[in-house]
Amino acid sequence: MAAVVGSHDLRTPVVIALQTLAVAACYYASGRLGLLRELVVEGAVVTPIWPPTGVSVACLLLLGLRCWPGIALGAFLIILSLTSPTPSALAVLAGNTAAPVVGYLLLRRAGFRTDLARLRDGLALVFLGAFAAMLISSTTGAGILIATGKIEWSGFWAVWLAWWVGDAMGVLIVTPVLLLLSRVRLPLSLARWKEATGLAVIACCLVPLAAQSPVSLLFLVYPLLIWAALRFQLAGSLLCALFASVLTTVAATDRVGPFERLSRVEVMMKLQAFNGAMALTALILSAVITEQIYTRRSVERACQELVEVLEHLTAGEVADGRASAEDGGHGRRQEE
């Protein structure tokens, strides 16, 4: 018994260490992807979508609070790839680590469920995990840029807003997809695969057209989101939103299509408004549809159970009636 307990105790630190390294690797890889597309706002370089925030919140929800060192390590590696670890850089690291941790604690306190099957879960992820928690990282980052003289006071709010929206978009777009992938179950039926393939083909044709066309056609993405949400719930709408967000961000940073003749601030505002509206639509619409489906199934199960109870009661009454009739007939024969 002692050998078994000792082996279990040794295995636990190893598992935690491996999880920490895996979280750090995922944070670093997603950060490098996010840095591929940048926007300059008031002299500061920001990312329209910062995927590491979404990765961090998803890892915390799936693995628990013990994975926060992996987030800090991943953020530190990103800083090392960009600059030297100065006190100001370490302050940014602290803000980038604290924001997802606070988001996780707020979601836990609100009773958040990772299946996103309820409307309240979608709203909690939007307003607590994304909008509220990411105020920490954006305020810390913009404040450090002011304190180090890298931006002027006049540009504080523009940089703060761009930083906050980029971090929030990472949570809104990346976190639900990772939570979904952790629960995916295959295979789907053949009919579902056919419809999913058709939706994917149409999205691959329509979304690049909407993102690259000089005429503003981004509204064409919303019928796809509605179709995906109605037929595939979270899986369809979130993947469609992620695909559209990536292609639109590429078009915005390349200043092509509907972003060609816009200023840098206008590009940021239009891109973030589109990404935010699309992510909110996909997340909340899917949550509402999923909640309605679960409610209908619960009602159907309750009705089925009620029918079975009524059938059982009816069968019992018939049996009791037959027994009473037989007893009555037996009594009359005895009297005769």
Image: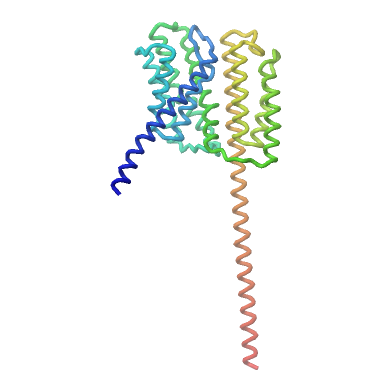
Say left or right for 160 vs 1. Answer: right
Q: Residue at x 59, y 7 (%)?
A: 263
Q: Residue at x 63, y 75 (%)?
A: 321
Of 272 and 72, the residue lying toward us: 72
Q: Where is residue 62 in the image (x, y as percent from the top left)?
A: 46, 35
Q: Could one spot residue 45 in this view of the protein?
A: yes
276 versus 334 height, above or below: above
Q: Furthest residue to the left? A: 2
Of 101 and 253, the residue lying toward us: 253
180 versus 304 height, above or below: above
- Could you tell me which quadrant the C terminus lies in? bottom right
Q: Residue at x 53, y 15 (%)?
A: 36
Figure disc tally: 0
Q: Position of residue 209 (x, y in %)?
A: 70, 19
Of 166 and 75, the residue lying toward us: 75
Q: Position of residue 162 (x, y in %)?
A: 51, 15
Q: Furthest residue to the bottom? A: 336
